[in-house]
Amino acid sequence: MNEKHLDVARALLDCQLLDANYIECGKVEDVELTGGVGRLEITALITGPGAAAERLPALLPPLARKLFGSRETRVPWNEVSVITGQIKLKSRAAELGLSVEEEKAARRLRKLPMAE
């Protein structure tokens, strides 16, 4: 495996994702690489509580998935616009399926007394 690609993948982990409107919409939990010996390409960034759970020590992933869910979202690499300390995406979070948890929370909050 090419060390240069591993360094890039490591640098992307835990970076904040920003959608086209500069709204925070997750963190990079994993990087999808394709190809073979001598030729690797980054094809997607993986985010979501399911992907985050996989990075926890051995006994914690099942508990984390139970508490926070197992949803993972794959953001195609061609959606990446700019990489600085954060990763800006070309599309809005909702278009990429990244605003699911926020929408669920908003629905719950609207049901509370005096929410309107």
Image (cartoon, rainbow, N blue to C red):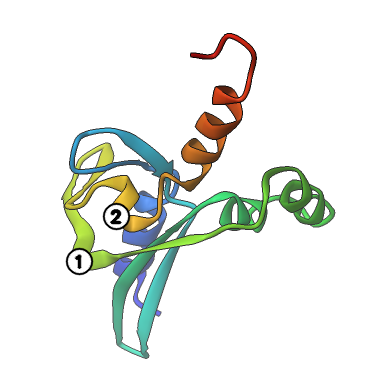
Q: Which residue is mark 1?
A: 78
Residue at x-position 57% and y-position 24%? 109
- The secondary structure type at the circle numbered 1 is helix
Q: Position of residue 10 (x, y in %)?
A: 41, 55
- Residue appearing at x 38%, y 75% in the figure: 33
Q: Position of residue 59 (x, y in %)?
A: 84, 54
Counting residues from the N terminus, which is met first, the one under dot 2 or under dot 1?
A: 1
Q: Residue at x 64, y 13 (%)?
A: 113
Secondary structure found at label 2: helix
Foreground: 29 or 79? 79
Rate crowding at label 1 as few (under 14), some (14 to 19) or many (20 or more) other CA atoms within 10 Å.
Answer: few
Question: How many tags in the picture?
Answer: 2
Q: Residue furthest bottom?
A: 36
- Describe residue 77's horizontal placement relative to residue 102 as left or right: left
- Residue 62 position (above or below residue 32): above
Q: Nearer the viewer, residue 37 or 103?
A: 103
Going by the numbered disc 2, the residue's amino acid type is Glu
The kind of residue on which mark 1 rests is: Asn
Percent across and percent down for residue 3 are 36, 69
Q: CA distance from mark 2 to mark 1?
A: 14 Å
Where does the N terminus fall, quadrant-wise?
bottom left
